[in-house]
Amino acid sequence: MFLINCPYCGERDQSEFSCGGEAHIVRPKQPTELSDDEWAEYLFMRKNIKGVQFERWNHAHGCRKWFNMVRDTSNDKIHAVYKMGEKPPVE
Amino acid sequence: MTKYRVNKTKHVDQTKTVSFDFDGKSYHGFEGDTLASALLSNGVHLVGRSFKYHRPRGIMSCGSEEPNAICQINEDTDLTEPNVRATEIELYEGLKASSQNCWPSVNFDIGGINNFISPFIPAGFYYKTFMWPKSFWKKIYEPLIRWSAGLGKSPTKPDPELYDHKHVHCDVLIIGGGISGIIASKIAAKNNFKTILIEDKNILGGSTIFQKNENYKINDKYSGEWIYEEIAELKKLDNLTIKTRTSLAAYHSYNYLLAKENISDHLPLDKRNGGIRQRLWKIRADKVIVATGAIERPLVFNNNDRPGIMLSNSVKKYLDFYGVSCGFNNVIFTNNDSAYETAVSLKEKGISVVIIDIRKKSNSKIVKNAEQLGVKIYWNSTVVNTFGLRKINSIEIMNLSEDGSNVVGDKNRINCDCLALSGGWTPMVHMHTQSGGKLDFREIDQTFIPNEINKNHINVGSCNGDFELEKIINNTNKKVKNFLKVSETEFDNTSVLNSKELDKRNIWLLPNYISEGKCKSFIDFQNDSTAKDIKLALREGFKSIEHVKRYTTTGMATDQGKLSNMHALGIVADTAGVKMGTLGTTTFRPPFTPLTFGSIVGRSVGNFFDITRKTSIHEWHIQNDAKFENVGQWKRPWYYPINEEGLHDAVQRESKAARDSAGILDASTLGKIDIQGTDASEFLNRVYTNAWSKLGIGKCRYGLMLNEDGMVYDDGVTTRLGENHYLMTTTTGGAANVLSKLEDYLQTEWPELDVYLTSVTDHYSTASICGPNSKKILTKIFPNKDFSDDAFPHMSYQNAKIDEINCRIMRISFTGELSYEINIESKFGKSLWEKCIEAGKEFKITPYGTETMHLLRAEKGFIIVGQDTDGTMTPIDLQMDWIVSKKKYDFIGKRSLYRSDTIREDRKQLVGLLTDDPNEILEEGAQIVSDIRKKPVEMIGHVTSSYFSPNLNKSIALAVVKSGKKLKGQKLIVPMENKNINVTVSESVFLDKENKRINA
């Protein structure tokens, strides 16, 4: 069970959070101009990395804010948390 | 005192007798005994039968690693518990225990025949045999296997006891109260760390506490005495919490640990007083020090499983801690120095002992000491066979060849009543690996030891591979100082006398003159897997240790292979000719020892299993005999039976009343989201499929929400309360998810929008009144309000007051009738409801529940999200094209509505179904076919909603059917178990197609 450092509340138990999958997938601004393949790429395609992965997390049972997390899925080490809209930290 | 109780110790109070029953026979033990030590003190070794061959088995160890002595306790009471280790049960007055896995009794067990047919039931026997003939499985094989398999009996009644959960935080958590755990705790607590020490036994001190021997001294005291004083000092420290009878179950990431505290299991049943039985500690520790110790390994040779064959250090503990001699004619079989401690202890008490040592020679002090005491040692020898049916009575030994691969010379028979095994020590690295730690293999004593990388946890003592006393003390001191950044401690200049060395001669499977196929050399005692089974698995092509484990079931019993895993690995490595350590290990999974279900669920049982949400009108529903239905966490009235009415009759009556005169529904559970902000209209445009910008203030609109994949997600009516203010309603079950989804989009995709969302579901109660007389009822409640269609048209809202209390009236309808919803602050919900009932009395206003609501809306073909949709239906599939805006540039899910898959014409589409026999009601979920003769029969859809409509006087149903739109008027078949029902595809709107009733 992780100890997650919510950028708004500080360290809290993982049970307060929910994971929203891969981060930095921007909803296309003009979906109607995309081909089926391009739309499918946005809609369905997600990475499942063994190693450092960028993820969206929500402090669902706390401040309800969404934020991003850099986590190594091979050892669950959390490298960084940062607010929505902020640039991911350079490795 | 029984003859086996040879020694007085301070841990067992021999003045306090405790009586107990085992297998129906009464015995006596003393306070401080475990069930195992008390049985041994009565000379009882045989305590169970093995799982597969039903071989007689005896107590082997003195701790959680015990594979054989597992019992059923408190049988025939609702406190009965199977699979409890006798070595861990603290003896209490009146304890009733019995052996498992034997029938009719442990001394004579019919299943013992499996022992004689064992050549025919090797590993994988079940997989290979019970495959054919196929028809035998259900009637013969399965019942037989079920009868003969299984350990113990489950309780049949609910657990009457209480369990607790407790969350704690600490600076330092120390797991294990042996010598290194005590040193670590003292250093931590004395340096102002908030410290918790947990120990699974009832006293601290581990195996040092019963050490009273010239060979082991600390600061010139016997190590047992030294630690006794240390513990006394430790207990005085302020910022240290000591939890005994508490075993660590799991070590999760970020130093989150679960430990189970036994609170009343050691008390006689009549002294438990209904208090808490066990408490699960949920610990978040800044730093963790693991000091879980090591487990002694057995040795693997022919017939190494008879009662009376035990682990050497356990024999010593029974003698020096419990005062019980496991035998009077002992043989110790070893490959290392530590067994000599047992020999010295026995010899000092005048008990006969000889040693069989695999090694050729040893010069360590402890070996010298044993020789001086006159212990006979057979060097370079191995046990090749054992004898004795229900208890060992003799062994055969032979010399080993130079390289240890074979036996040479003559057989030598030695009589004995106890054979103590010592195959060296296995560090308990379970906690380390559970936390994500890796292991290194150490050649010299063939052990896996922790490779530490996590900076917030260390391993100390023998679980770290330190087995010699001075190493344990000095390394623990050094590591803890480093870990906690402490510069000096009281242990810095401890003088230690140690007499044993790490040296050993490791042979995983001892050689024999008997051919391998005829040897029963047990590796996993509980699951009866032998060295032969492991080799068979390798011959059959299993290479991964994880596969070998599963095929042979080695390490898969309730002891989780604490004694067997290393030997399995060793034999696999030897046989496959690879280096030990390159194979890795099997995975160490939590829990370390079995947890009770009670401790896992804690107080979350019965009414506390989940939150129950009730509306403010709930009491009225109860008083009026409502039957309730769970909708999400809500309790909603399902129907209101009058007298002896059943569901069907009540729903028919309620549905008729709602259309003929007036009905009233508690709609408070529908999700309500208050939406404010200058971009509120734009936001709704983006989340709903239809257009919202032009909705006038005071108007309501039905909206459909999709997922980004184009599938219908939720629906509901949203009201524009002001220029920048909306009230959205959602389905009852979807409320929380809809709010989360909307927040997600606002925060992550459209942060530029000025919109604020607040859940107000619980803030308002809603009474929904429908039917041709609803207008008259509203007029009575609000005499000053103009309810004419011009002043208050359909799909609009107005503020109003009842007794000076503000409320909102929405003229909206999900029954298709003229209907109004009154929203009022929750605390006034019940009085509002009662007012409506009072005002409606003359119109026979009828309260109706969810079932009638579903029926009424089905008559109108209105969908219920989650019943008529299942996450695979687009609005087009639902024939709701009218609600999808063509003009809007974008909304959630729009692009997906013309993906190649969503524009397929043969998708399942919502249609109505009418049965040829109007009295035949279809079953919801029933499959629909068009051609019953063509095999295989193609299922083209299923029924989603089905009712008998009292207003139409016929059966109606909604269904999703492939290409349903094109099938209107066609005959289809709903095949049921004993008949085929003929149906015709129809419109999905059955009643009032012109929507006249809404303004009736």
Image (cartoon, coloured by chain):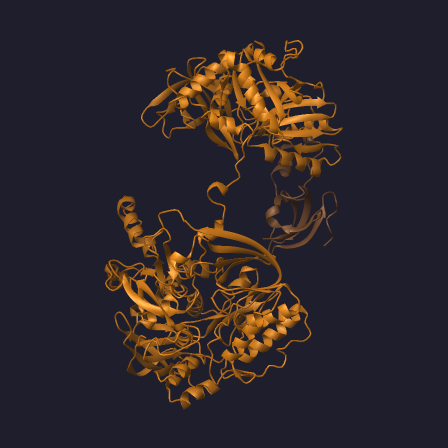
Chain colours: A brown, B orange
Q: Residue at x 29, y 54 (%)?
A: B148
Judge by depth and name the residue closer to the eye, B962 or B862.
B862
B121 relative position to B882: left or right = left
Judge by depth and name the residue closer to the eye, B71 or B578.
B71
Q: In the picture shown, does residue B809 fall above or below B935?
A: above
Q: Position of residue B194 (x, y in %)?
A: 63, 63
Q: Position of residue B322 (x, y in %)?
A: 40, 73
The part of the image, by quadrant, that contains residue B520 is: bottom left
Q: Position of residue B253 (x, y in %)?
A: 59, 56
Instruction: Report if residue B379 is visible in the image.
Output: no
| Number of numbered markers | 0
The part of the image, by quadrant, that contains residue B193 is: bottom right
Judge by depth and name the residue closer to the eye, A6 or B3.
B3
Q: Residue at x 55, y 73 (%)?
A: B232
Q: In the picture shown, does residue B304 fall above or below B588?
A: below
Q: Quadrant of the C terminus of chain B?
A: top right
Q: Quadrant of the N terminus of chain B?
A: bottom left
Q: Residue furthest bottom?
A: B372
Instruction: Report if residue B975 is visible in the image.
Output: yes
B99 relative position to B659: left or right = left
Judge by depth and name the residue closer to the eye, B799 or A64.
B799
Q: Position of residue B215 (x, y in %)?
A: 48, 84
B193 relative position to B56: left or right = right
